[in-house]
Amino acid sequence: MMTVTAVTPGAPPVPVVKKRPPVIVDFARSQPLAAFSMFFILTLVFASIFAKWIAPYDPFALDFAVMLQEPSAQHWFGTDNFGRDVFTRVLYGAQTALMIGILASFFGSILGGIIGVVSGFFSGRFDFIVQRFIDVLLSFPIIVLAVVAVAMLGKFLVFGVDLNLVVAIAIPIVPKVARVVRASALTIREMPYIDAARASGFGPARIIFRHMTPNVFAPFIILFAAFVAQAILLEASLSFLGLGVTEPTPAWGLMLSGNAADFYREAPWMIIFPGLAISVTVFAFNLFGDGLRDYLDPKFKL
C-alpha cells in the first residue's frame, strides 16, 4: 500500500511506500489457522527432538507394578499393559512419525517432481508413456501400493530408521506429485524465456533444472507439506497392520494395535491418546498445506 504526503504547499506529492511486514507475520495475518498449525507442528518437532529430556520416563522400561493405571499426576496419559508410560511413548512416537513422514514425503515429492517436469518438458510420446504408467499407479489405493512395497522390500535399518519403509510410503506419493507438477511444467514450457533458452542452444537438462524446476518450486513445497500428513497416516496404518515399525519401538500406529485392542474397555487411554496424536498431527499438516497453497498461489488471493 502507498500513502501520499506533501512536503511543502504547491509541491508535488511524495509517495511514501509502507514497509512490507516479514513473511511470517504476513502469513500469520492472512492464514491464521495455517499459522497456528505451523506453530503446533514446530512445537511437536521440538518436543520430539528433545524427548529424551522432556519425557518423564523411559519409553522401553517395564513396570508391572503400575500396569494399566489411569491418567494421573504421575502418568499424564496413564500406563499400558506393560506398565510403560503412555505419554512418554506418545512423545517418542512423534519422532518415528515425523522422521518417516518427512523423509517419505521429501523423497516422494522430489522423485515425483522430477518425473513431472521431465514429462511436461518433452511431452509427445514420452509424456504419453509416462502418464499411462502414472495412471496405473493412481488406480491402486495408496495403502495397497504401500503394503506391496513393504512386502517386496523387507526391512533395511540405517541409524534406527527403516529406509525400506520410507521408500514404501514414498512410492504412492510419487504419481500424485508427478501429475500436479506436470500440469505446471506444461504451462511453463510455453513461456518466452524457455523459447529463448532453446534459441540460445541450451540443452534439455539445463532448461529443465535451471529454468523450469525453480518455477515449479512453489507447488512442490505445497505438495511436500500436504503429503507429510499422508505419509504419517500411512506409517501408522502399516504399523497397525504389523508391516511397519515393530516392538518395542514407540510408534503411534503400533500403540493402537496388538494388546491395546484387548484392553480398550479396561484402559481406553491406551487407544485414545495415540489416536488423538495421529488425528491432530495429520489435521495440522493438512491445514498448514492448505494455508500455504492459499498464500503462495495468486489464484486464491483474488
Image (tube, rainbow, N blue to C red):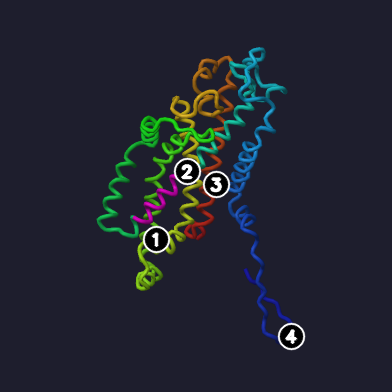
Give the percent coordinates (x, y) of residue 116: 37, 53
Q: Secondary structure at mark 1?
A: helix
Q: Residue at x 47, y 59 (%)?
A: 299
- Up-down: is 16 above or below 171? below
The residues tagged by marks 3 and 1 sit, at their Cα atoms, a distance apart of 29 Å
Mark 2 surroundings: few (<14), some (14-19) or many (≥20) residues within 10 A = many
Q: Please give the residue where the numbered disc 3 appears in the rendered image.
A: 288
Indicate which disc, 3 or 2, sits on the residue closer to the N terminus: 2
Q: Please give the residue where the numbered disc 1 appears in the rendered image.
A: 208
Q: Is residue 270 left or right of residue 240?
A: right
Identify the amino acid type marked 1. Answer: Ile
Q: Please give the residue where the numbered disc 4 appears in the rendered image.
A: 9
Identify the amino acid type marked 3. Answer: Phe
- Up-down: is 146 above or below 290? above
The residues tagged by marks 4 and 1 sit, at their Cα atoms, a distance apart of 56 Å
Q: Which mark is residue 118?
A: none
Indicate which disc, 1 or 2, sits on the residue closer to the N terminus: 2
Q: Is residue 110 magenta?
A: yes
